[in-house]
Image (tube, helix red, strand yellow):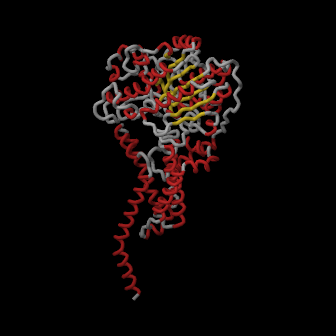
Amino acid sequence: MASTSSRDRDNLNTQQQPARITTILVWAALLTAFMAVTTNGFSDRATLLVAQERVGTLVLYLGVWAVCWVCFLVAAMQPNRIVRWVWACILSLSVAASQAYFLVSGSDLGPFDVLSLKAASHELGRAMAQFVSAAIWFGCVFAGSLAVIVLAPTPGFRLWRSHGTKLAWMPALPVALIGAILIMKEGGGSHALPQHFTPLAVTAVTLTKTAMQPKATRAQQVAKPAGKPAVRNIVMLVDESIRGDYVDLTPGNPFTPLLAKRTSDIVNFGASASGGNCSHYSNALLRLGGSRRDIVNSVNHNPTIWQFAKQAGYRTVFIDAQASVNKNRSRLQNFMTPGEVKDIDRFVTFDDVATPDLDHELMNVVKQELAQAGPVFIYANKNGAHFPYHHGYPAHDAPFKVDGPQDWSASKAAIIKSYLNNIRWNVDRLLADFLDTTNLTNTVVLYTSDHGQAFNPGGITHCSVDNPDPREGLVPMLAMTSHPAVLSRLKSSAEKSWAKTSHFQIAPTILGLMGYSSQTIARSHGPSLFEAPAPEISSGFSSGDIFGLFRQDVRWNDLDLTKSYLEPEARQLPGARHSAQVAD
C-alpha cells in the first residue's frame, strides 16, 4: 500500500513538473524584465560599443550583465526565505534609490553624487518635502522590486532545495565586480549596469575611498584684498562644448562673423587649454580654485571663487542654463554642494524654457544684474552647443543646410554643420547682441567653454578618460571690456600669450581684478592672464578624477595650441581657409 502511494506521488510530481518549469520560466522572464526596465541606457551603450567596434569592451559589458542576471535570479529564488527577504530588501533599496535619484537629477548615481548626498544628508527632510514625486516613485519601485523577488517561486528541483542556500552570498558577487570596475576606471565604467547592484557598489567604493582619504577641509577665511577692485562688475561666462578653433575673430570667417565685426572691446587670447575634458570637472576647477601645479590639494582646500568675491565686497550671482535640460531639479550640478551655495546671493535656473531660448534668457539675466547698483560677480553656465546639436537652435535660423539625419548616424560633415549652426545661434548672435546693448565701461567679461568637442565617427565627443582626442580640451579664451586701463593690459598680455593660456589662469585673473595681491594669488592659484604663463600652464588638460578620490596623480593629456585641429569638413566652408585662427 505504501509503495503504491509513493508511486502515485512520483507520478503526480512528474505530471506537475512541466507546469512548475513553465511557472519558473515566466517568473524568470518577469525578473529579467524588471531588472532591464530599471536600468537606464543599456541599448545606447551597447549600440555605441558596436559602432566603435570595441568588441572586447562589449563582451566584458555583456558579461557583467550576465553575472548580474544570474545572481539576481539566485537571490529571488532562494529556498531559504530569510536569505531571500534579506536580499530582497537590500536589492530593492538599491534600485529604488537609483530610480528616485534619476528622476530628480536626470543621471545615474555616481561616486561624487554619493559624496554630495552624504554632505547634504542633514537636508533629507526638506529634500523629501521638495521632491514628493521622487519619494513616491521610490516607494513604488521598492514595493514592486520587493514583490517580484519575494513572491518568485522556488524551483522544485531536489538539488536546488538542498544546496541552494549555499549560494546565499552569491548576489554580493556583482557588487564586488562592479566595484572593481569603478576602481579601475577611477569612478567611471558603471553606466548602464543593473541598478539592483550598481548603487550598492558605487556607495561601498565611495565611502571606503572617503574613509581612507585624509579629511579635506576647505579654507573658510579669506584675507581682505590688498587694494581696490579694478572694475565694478565681473562676469565669468562659461559656455558648453564650444571648441576654441570655432570661435574666430577674423573678418569674413564662417564660424563667428558677427563677433568679428565687434573686436574693439574683445581681447582674443587664441585657442586655450581647458582644465578638464568633462563639464563637471572643468566647472569644479574654475569655481573651486584649482591650481595647475597641485590640482588635488587646491580643489579640496582652496576657498571657492564665491568666498573671494564676497570678501571683496561683490554680490554673487550664479546662472545655470543647463539644469532644466538635464532635468536636474535639485539644481546642484558639477560637484556644487550646499556649503558652496551659502556664499551665492542669487541662484538662477530656467523652467519651461525651450532649449534654443535658454542662453537668450541667461544673457538677459546677466544684463539685468549688470544694470543693478553695486558691484556684482556673476558666474554663468551657458547651454551652448551641447549635443544633440540640432536641439540648440531653431530650424528656421540655420546658416548651414543639413541634409538627412542629424544624430550620430549622420556624416561628419552634417554633424559639423549642425554644430556650427548652434554656435552661430548661441555664441555669435548672442555675444554680438550683448556687446551692442551692454555698457562694459566698468565691467570685465571672461569667456571660455568647459571643454571642446571631437567629431570622431561613432566616438564620444568629450569626457574620455584614457587617451582623449586633443580637441576635447581645446577651448576659446576671450575677454570683453570697455574699461580703458584693463583693456590695454589685456591686449598687451594677449600679444605675449597668444595660444599659451589655460583655464587655470581665469580664477587668478578674476582675483586680481577684485583687488587681491599678486602674492596671495600666486600662493593659492598661480599666474593670471595678465602675466606670462609658466611653460606647463598650457601644456595640456586633465581627464578623470581631480579630487584624489581614486588616484593622487592627475591624468594629463597633450594639447599643442599652436597646431591646427580643424577638420577638413570645416576647412571647406567659404572663408575658413583665410582665418588666422585656424591656419596651418
Horizontal arrangement in the rendering, residue 468 relative to residue 412 (left or right): right
Which quarter shows the C terminus? top left
Which quarter shows the N terminus? bottom left
**Is 159 in front, or is 123?**
123
Residue 481 spot, x, y in % from top left = 54, 17
Horizontal arrangement in the rendering, residue 70 relative to residue 123 (left or right): left
Residue 468 spot, x, y in % from top left = 45, 30
Quick check: 489 above or below 391? above
Q: Residue at x 66, y 28 (%)?
A: 310
Instruction: Give the tally of numbered discs.
Output: 0
**Is 229 in front, or is 289?**
229
**Is 22 in front, or is 237?**
237
**Is 534 in front, or is 413?**
413
Quick check: 179 above or below 287? below
Residue 176 visible here: no
Q: Residue at x 68, y 21 (%)?
A: 520
